[in-house]
Amino acid sequence: EVILSCSTNCTLNDNHTYIWYKNGRQVKDGFTKVNKLYLDSVSNEELQQYYCAVG
């Protein structure tokens, strides 16, 4: 299992969300209130394709 974490230096309000993307497309189940994305297995090359946004 691989766990990706999203962090920010900004002050977040109470109803913020984390949105995860892979190759510019939103990840299924990637819209969440927690800052972690759990993946069953992923290659090092694929890891570089993931990123998150906070809204």
Image: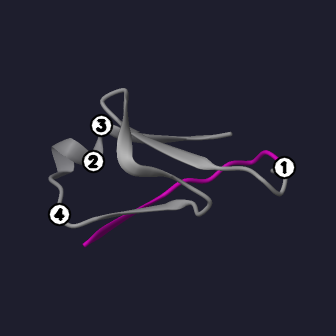
Decide which of tag 3 and tag 4 comes sooner along the chain. 4
Task: State the SS at label 3.
Answer: loop
Residue 17, above or below 2: above
Q: Is residue 18 above or below residue 1?
A: above
In which image quadrant can residue 49 be found? top left
Residue at 52% x, 44% y is: 19
The answer to the question of whether label 2 and label 3 lie on touching residues, with beta carbons closer than 8 A, is: yes
- Label 1, residues with CA under 10 Å away: few <14, some 14-19, many ≥20: few
Cβ–Cβ under 8 Å for marks 4 and 1: no
Dots 3 and 1: beta carbons under 8 Å? no
Q: Residue at x 84, y 49 (%)?
A: 11
**Amino acid beneath label 4:** Ser
| Dominant secondary structure, magenta | loop
Residue topped by disc 1: 11
Up-down: is 21 above or below 32? above
Locate residue 30, reporting x and y percent: 43, 50
Which range is magenta?
1-11
Q: Is residue 47 left or right of residue 21?
A: left
- Name the kind of residue labelled 1 in the image: Thr
Q: Earlier in the sequence, mark 4 or mark 1?
A: 1
Q: Position of residue 7 (x, y in %)?
A: 61, 53
- Real-space CA distance between mark 4 and mark 1, rounded to the nearest whole angstrom: 32 Å
**Residues at marks 2 and 3, CA–CA distance in whole angstroms:** 5 Å
Q: On the image, numbered disc 2 is attached to which residue?
A: 47
* Mark 2 and mark 4: Cα distance apart in space: 10 Å
Please tell me which of labels 2 and 4 falls first in the chain: 4
Q: Which residue is mark 4?
A: 41
Could you tell whether 23 is left or right of 16 in the image?
Answer: left
User: In which quadrant will I find the N terminus?
Assistant: bottom left
Mark 3, residue position: 49
Q: Amino acid at mark 3?
A: Gln
Report which quarter residue 51 is drawn in: top left
